[in-house]
Amino acid sequence: SIKRENYDEDTPTKDSTLISVTLNDIKKASAQTNMFHDKKDSHYNLISALHKSMRGSDVNASLYYLGKMLAGGDNPLYIARRVIRFASED
């Protein structure tokens, strides 16, 4: 069980409830195909964000964008080539 706290914008009090996440819930969520991004704009935005996060030495952001690209269906060899190119530039 996970404790979820709901804050109402109109009142200063908070309502705490417990929600339950099962293994079946996780399997269903991971099987959804809505993680794929379009191959035009989003693809280039993600590779740009990956470069910027690596340039800024933001490890968490770099891993986030790398994971998002892989989950979105980008070719791992393309990503590897771009990371190697980035390493040779900086």
Image (cartoon, helix red, strand yellow):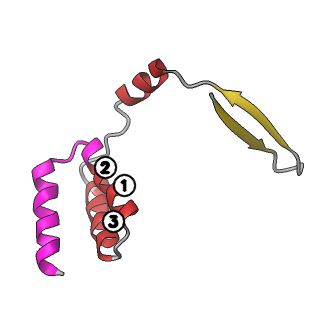
| Pointer 3 local density, CA inside 10 Å: few below 14, some 14–19, many at least 20 | some
Q: Return the residue nearer the eye: 37 or 32.
A: 32
What's the residue type where badge 3 is placed?
Ala
Label 2 and label 3: CA atoms lie apart by 12 Å
The disc label shown at residue 67, or none: 2
Of tags 1 and 3, which is closer to the observer?
Answer: 1
Q: Please state the horizontal and vertical placement of residue 27, each as a whole percent of the image.
A: 40, 23
Q: Please state the horizontal and vertical placement of residue 69, each as a whole percent of the image.
A: 27, 50
Q: Please state the horizontal and vertical placement of residue 68, each as a whole percent of the image.
A: 33, 49
Range shown magenta: 70-89
Label 1 and label 2: CA atoms lie apart by 5 Å
Label 1 and label 3: CA atoms lie apart by 10 Å
Q: Return the residue nearer the eye: 36 or 12.
A: 12
Residue 10 part of the magenta segment: no
CB-based contact (under 8 Å), mark 2 and mark 3: no
Q: Quadrant of residue 46?
A: bottom left
Dominant secondary structure of the residues highlighted in magenta in the image: helix
Query: For mark 3, what is the residue?
Result: 49
- As drawn, 34 above or below 31: below
The disc label shown at residue 21, or none: none
Q: Which residue appears at 25% of the width and 53% of the height?
A: 40
What's the residue type where badge 2 is placed?
Gly
Q: Return the residue nearer the eye: 3 or 73.
A: 3
Q: Which residue appears at 37% of the width and 55% of the height?
A: 64
Disc 1 element = helix
Q: Quadrant of residue 81?
A: bottom left
Q: Residue furthest bottom?
A: 90
The disc label shown at residue 64, or none: 1
Q: How many numbered circles are shown?
A: 3
| Pointer 2 local density, CA inside 10 Å: few below 14, some 14–19, many at least 20 | few
Residue 87 part of the magenta segment: yes
